[in-house]
Image (spheres, rainbow, N blue to C red):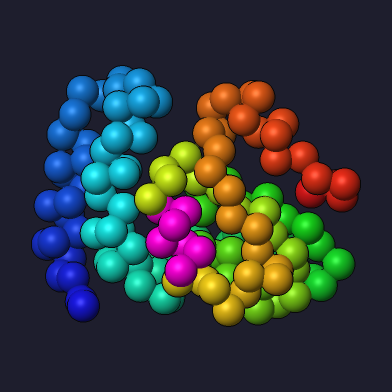
Amino acid sequence: MEYSKEDLIEAKSKILGYEENIGTEESKKIWEKNAQFWDNAMGDESNEFHREVVRPKVTELLSPNPEDYIFDIACGNGNYSSYLAQRGASVVAFDYSKKMIELAKRRQSQYAKQIEFCVADATDRKSILELKRNRAF
């Protein structure tokens, strides 16, 4: 299913239509509600902005290789995690939306050996520490 630029702008305005400084729990509720829409909109390749602007620059900074173990914060539907996995990196990918992680696991199932998807809150130190593995990120 394809979404127009107007559909994405409308979705963004609905998401941002809440008070400016919403709390983590309210934000999580919004993402739980919008997870399927976001997954559908991003599809397997993400949107043009991510493919043409974000991905090249982040990849340049990371310079991923098969020896790398990368932490993907707020991974969404896992598109960038799969991009890293295609380059041989191992990834721990997390998002605070349980629904988003379910969708990511389904969408990126072919990379299950290289990507570990987890539910965790980047704003919660304890939540992040629980993701610690026996390798350095």
Q: Position of residue 91 (x, y in %)?
A: 69, 60
Q: Indicate the quadrant where residue 122 lies.
A: top right
Q: Position of residue 62 (x, y in %)?
A: 71, 59
- In the displayed structure, 3 sits above or below 37; it is below
- In the displayed structure, 37 sits above or below 51; it is above
Q: In this image, 91 relative to 7: left or right? A: right
Q: Nearer the viewer, residue 136 or 133?
A: 133
Q: Position of residue 76 (x, y in %)?
A: 44, 54
The residue that appears at 21% across and 78% down in the rendered structure is 1
The residue that appears at 77% across and 40% down in the rendered structure is 132
The residue that appears at 81% across and 72% down in the rendered structure is 66
The residue that appears at 16% across and 34% down in the rendered structure is 17
Q: In this image, 115 relative to 14: left or right? A: right
Q: Indicate the quadrant where residue 22 lies.
A: top left
Q: In this image, 60 relative to 103: left or right? A: right
Q: Is residue 83 visible?
A: no
Q: Is residue 4 visible?
A: yes
Give the magenta-colored segment's residue range. Answer: 100-106
